[in-house]
Image (cartoon, rainbow, N blue to C red):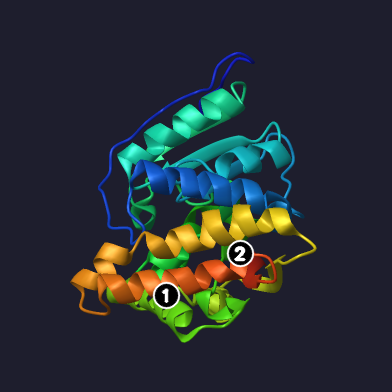
């Protein structure tokens, strides 16, 4: 592993290929990912803390939105952050440099199915909102298990758009959510993967698999979440596939906008929005 002084972030970048991502790689999406990570940090990262000196792999670090929270909860770890998008890695490096300039980070640009690390290279592997975008999550888990030492832990966090429920409930609002699920499936992903984490991990050979729900609720008692989660995280994610849904013939631009307008009512006074994430922890035997 590379090392860093207290004043600088260690950097090593390796080459790899680029893949598709249903939400796109725009600056708007990068901001949405940051908003999402900051809003959900307490909910999703609670209970995840690695000892100083631990060799940790974050597979699919993206723009570093989760990386900074991972470093906050586990200071002193030797982190390798990997992603298939060079542009996302550049954003992640900048985010970490600004947030945690003394962190020991190695950056890897490449496909997590073909990681160039020896067997058992890491004590812990952390994966957040990655498996949902992969055509073969089982193969990805097998690749991650190879680089995880025996007795090491894998933590996986995924959402499940089928758990989104809101009030007022409008048919148009539900349709635009369904369009996102359909587009992700057409691209080889699975926006409903949260419910599959236990069988995926068990079939991949992990043991002591424990999966628990982490539910976000935005209502009148938590009005700030209507802005940070309902509007800026979930609705923004749905809105981002407008052009793609229209191009695929799933809807018209007018119908899509009506559905989004219905969905926005969940973030208004009297509205509610609820969504469940699933967090799994498993051990490599």
Q: Residue at x 62, y 21 (%)?
A: 102
Residue located farthest toward the right when viewing the structure as drawn? 221
Q: Is residue 76 above or below residue 199?
A: above
**Image location of residue 15, percent across then percent down:** 28, 38
Q: Nearer the viewer, residue 272 or 102?
A: 272
Q: Quadrant of the C terminus?
A: bottom right
Q: Secondary structure at mark 1?
A: helix
Give the left or right position of residue 145, taking residue 89 as reference.
Answer: right
- Residue 9 image position (x, y, % from top left): 53, 22
Q: Nearer the viewer, residue 175 or 132?
A: 175
**As drawn, 4 above or below 279:** above
Residue 188 visible in the shown view: no
- Residue 267's image quarter? bottom right
Q: Mark 2 highlights which residue?
A: 267
**Residue at point 54% right, 74% down?**
160
* Residue 183 appears left or right of 120: left
Q: What kind of element bears circle 2? A: helix
Mark 2–mark 1 distance (CA, rounded to whole Å)? 14 Å
> What residue is at 37 percent from the left and 66 percent from the top?
134
Residue 28, by quadrant, is: top left
Foreground: 258 or 93?
258
Task: Identify the residue under disc 1.
Answer: 259
Neighbours of disc 1 within 10 Å: few (<14), some (14-19), many (20+):
many
- Cβ atoms at labels 2 and 1 below 8 Å apart: no
How many residues crowd mark 2 within 10 Å: few (<14), some (14–19), many (20+)? many
Please tell me which of labels 2 and 1 falls first in the chain. Answer: 1
Query: Can you give x and y, in whole percent of width and height, for residue 75 in the image?
Result: 71, 33
């Amino acid at each position: 592993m590379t090392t860093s002084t207290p004043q600088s972030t260690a950097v090593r970048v390796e080459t790899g290929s680029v893949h598709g991502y249903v939400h796109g790689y725009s600056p708007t999406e990068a901001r949405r990912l940051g908003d999402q990570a900051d809003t959900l940090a307490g909910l999703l990262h609670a209970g995840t803390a690695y000892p100083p000196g631990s060799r940790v792999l974050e597979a699919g670090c993206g723009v570093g939105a989760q990386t900074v929270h991972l470093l906050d909860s586990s200071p002193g770890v030797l982190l390798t952050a990997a992603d298939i998008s060079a542009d996302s890695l550049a954003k992640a490096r900048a985010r970490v440099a600004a947030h945690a300039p003394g962190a020991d980070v190695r950056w890897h640009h490449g496909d997590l199915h073909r990681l160039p690390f020896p067997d058992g290279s890491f004590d812990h592997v952390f994966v957040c909102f990655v498996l949902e975008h992969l055509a073969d999550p089982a193969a990805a888990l097998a690749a991650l298990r190879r680089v995880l030492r025996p007795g090491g832990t894998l933590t996986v966090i995924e959402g499940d758009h089928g758990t989104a429920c809101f009030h007022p409930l409008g048919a148009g609002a539900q349709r635009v959510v369904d369009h996102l699920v359909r587009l992700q499936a057409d691209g080889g992903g699975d926006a409903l993967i949260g419910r599959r984490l236990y069988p995926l991990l068990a079939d991949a050979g992990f043991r002591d698999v424990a999966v628990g729900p982490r539910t976000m609720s935005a209502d009148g008692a938590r009005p700030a979440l209507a802005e940070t989660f309902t509007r800026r995280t979930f609705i923004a994610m749905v809105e981002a596939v407008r052009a793609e849904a229209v191009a695929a013939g799933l809807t018209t631009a007018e119908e899509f906008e009506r559905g989004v307008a219905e969905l926005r009512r969940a973030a208004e006074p009297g509205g509610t929005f609820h969504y469940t994430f699933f967090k799994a922890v498993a051990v490599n035997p």
